[in-house]
Amino acid sequence: MSQQYVLSVLVDNSIGVLGRVTGLFSRRGYNIKSLNVAETENPEFSRMTIVTEGDSATIEQIEKQLLKLYDVTEVKRLEDAVCREHILIRAGNSPSSRQPIIEIANLFRAKVVNVGEDSLMLELTGEPEKISSFIGLLRPFKIDKMVRTGICALERD
C-alpha cells in the first residue's frame, strides 16, 4: 500500500548535490511530491526535506540509495516531526471580493502582503492541511497565482 513519507537528508553544501539526489529519484522512477533545500546552522551542510510516496520497502530502498551518494551524510525518515509549509497567493477578481478575502485571511492568521486594484496577495505558514484548506476557501474568489514552498520538517526531541 502506497503511503506518503517525509525524508530529512543532510548533504554537503556543494555544487551538483541537488542534481545527484533528484537524478537518483528520476533514474529509479520515484516521484518527489515536495522538495525543500536550504543551508543548515553549519554552512558546510544543507538539509533536504523530501516528500515522496511508496510502500515501506520502496522507502527503505530510497534511503539506502541516498546513503550511497558520496555527498549524503544522513537520511532520516521523519515520523514524529513538526511539518510546516509557506504559501504566497494572489486572489480576487474585483474590489468587492477584497473584504471576504480579508475575513478568510483573518480566520487563518494569514498576512496581507500586497494590495492590487482587483486582488490581494497573502502569505500563510502552517501545516500542509491548513494551507490546503486556505486555498479551498479562496478558490471562489479566483486564485490568480500562487506558490507553495513545500514541506519543511524537523523531528521532535
Image (cartoon, rainbow, N blue to C red):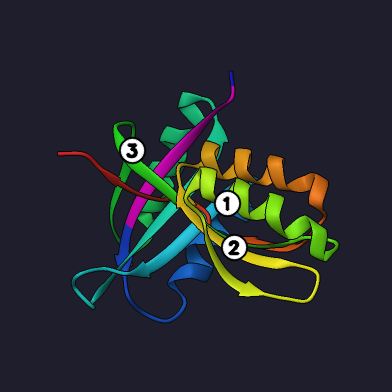
Residue that numbered label 2 is attached to: 122
Q: Residues within 10 Å of mark 2 (few under 14, many from 20)?
A: many
Viewer-side residue, 59 vs 114: 114
Q: Position of residue 9 (x, y in %)?
A: 35, 54
Which of the 4 image quarters holds residue 123?
bottom right
* Residue beneath the point at 52% across and 54% down: 150
Quarter of the image containing the N terminus?
Answer: top right
Q: Main secondary structure of the magenta part?
A: strand
Q: CA distance from mark 3 to mark 1?
A: 30 Å
Looking at the image, can residue 28 be seen?
no
Magenta stretch: give its range.
2-9
Which of the 4 image quarters holds residue 82?
top left
Amino acid type at circle 2 is Leu
Looking at the rendered image, the disc whose residue lies closer to the viewer, 3 or 1, is 1
Mark nearer the N terminus (2 vs 3): 3
The numbered dot on residue 78 is: 3
Task: State left or right for residue 20 relative to residue 76.
Answer: right
Residue that numbered label 1 is attached to: 105
Amino acid type at circle 1 is Ala
Q: Residues within 10 Å of mark 1 (few under 14, many from 20)?
A: some
| Label 2–label 1 contact, CB within 8 A | yes
Viewer-side residue, 104 vs 57: 104
Q: CA distance from mark 2 to mark 1?
A: 8 Å
Element on which disc 2 rests: strand
